[in-house]
Amino acid sequence: MEATGILKLRVILDKDNAEKLILPSRPNSVQALIDEIKSRLNFTFDFRLQFHDPDFDNALCNLVKIEDLPAIASVKVVRLVELDRISTSTDDTILQTDSTDTIDSPERVSRWPEVFIVPPFSYEVEHVLREGNAAFDKDGKVVTLTRDQKHNILETMGEEIYKLKAYPSTTQIGKAAEALVRKHPCLKERNSDTGWEGWKNSLRYKMGNQRKKMAKAGIMDVAVNAGKRSRTNPDGASPRANIKRPRRGEVNFLPSYPSGETRESLETRRLEMVEEFKKTSAERDIPLIHQHMMRTFALRREEIVTTSPPVSELKDRWPALFHETQLIGLYKKRKTGRVGERMEQLLLAHGKQDKNDIYATRTAALAGLPMYLKEDSSEIFKTCKDEIEFYEATIALVADVDEEEVPGGVPFSPRQVFIVLEDQVVMTHHSWTDALVCLFGLIYALHLSYPEKCTGFFEFIQVVLLKLDDERKQLKPKLQTLKNELV
């Protein structure tokens, strides 16, 4: 069935929350619809869909065929729970991603949503708000809460925010406060420009108290920042110094150990993986390695975030971490000055490639991005003519090529591409774009900073292409301009 006709959906999240979603056309498949809902509502978890089937008096049925869905319909999101996602492949080129799907460690399961879902409050508070909203709709009267009632609202909202993020930005807290007043207009503040500024400030202080409470309970992502200067610890570091928190939209930045696990039991699993990597690739137990990598995620993140060990040490301790299991049109416009000359060289090289080669197009798009942004990528993208084991660079992609000169330092047909971290080759690929994907993943997994001269390049990939944005800072003007041109 072709994707035709507007689709109006009521997406049911739970018994108290639903979102309206209008799609300009009907997706071609149920999976395409799921992907669209994920993108629009910023979901990161897996789910299936049910719909109210008119053939059965609108009883809920699983959505199997997209053509069964009426043009105006209600669909229910049913979360899928998968504890083990173990590959049965024995191919030693499996990309071993540093997954945040940690077994039995459920601190967070999704990123901050586009629309904050206000949770239900106590029975008493829900009654007061229901009556208050009715009075507000009738004569614009706002409700007066008791101290305990306001405390319940802030406590419940704080817990809901913490489920999404331990260190929310001011913007995100504001969105939560706005959602609260939008759902319960009787809470609107009379002497506020927004109607919710006071709620925003109260929630900000509540989150500080929430973190202190969680830190005392031993929750890792906030306990790691405990012990700062205070009345009882006057010699401690400044409370705002070196705060360890997500920098790139990580969902589970520093999770607690899985239920039933200890540091010792996780260390045993780590040692078992080290032993597996002493075997040949054909002999390795890939499902076991994958399961142990999932299970030991919390231990690995604790090491990386709290102690920042050198890459050489991480490679020895976590060998599985280092094994793998529309820009072109804009570039053509930029043909003036030195940037234009370099861009012209790249486009000429791309023109010599097979027009149907998607890998060549991806390479040209990514290689041209630093040029378009007027960034110097020469220290990051390099070439050589022989196989290497060491290369003097903090972060680099070094391509083994035959050509004397390679536009932008990025070859279309390298013999191999070396990923270099802290002067060591840590991984090797035959595709430059695949190597770049792995490099980006390693920068995240090892909690590294972006190369200083190419921050715009990596931030564009993070924020615009991957949509991993913690909303703590605005895009630089040149990145925002490029994003606007691509929309």
Image (cartoon, grey):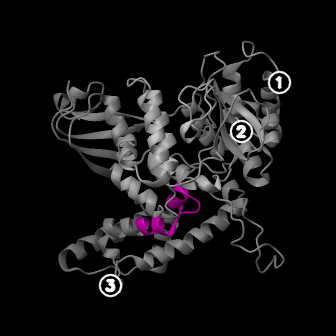
Q: Main structural element of the magenta stretch: helix, strand or loop?
A: helix
Seen from this angle, which residue lies furthest top? 282
Pointer 1: residues within 10 angstroms few (<14), some, or many (20+)? Answer: few
Vertical position of residue 152 compared to residue 429: above or below: below
Question: Is 467 on the left-hand or right-hand side of 424?
Answer: left
Please name the residue shown 67% across and 51% down the image.
254
Question: Is 413 on the left-hand or right-hand side of 392?
Answer: left
Foreground: 252 or 324?
324
Task: Look at mark 1 in the image and give the residue it sits on.
Answer: 275
Residue 16 appears anywhere in the view: no
In the rendered image, which quarter is residue 184 located in? bottom left
Q: Secondary structure at mark 1?
A: helix
Using the image, tell me which numbered label, if any, was put on residue 420: 2
Please name the residue shown 35% across and 75% down the image.
187
Seen from this angle, which residue lies furthest bottom? 191
Q: Position of residue 360 (x, y in %)?
A: 47, 29
Please name the residue shown 61% across and 17% down the image.
88
Please name the residue shown 32% across and 84% down the image.
190
Q: Position of residue 276 (x, y in %)?
A: 79, 22
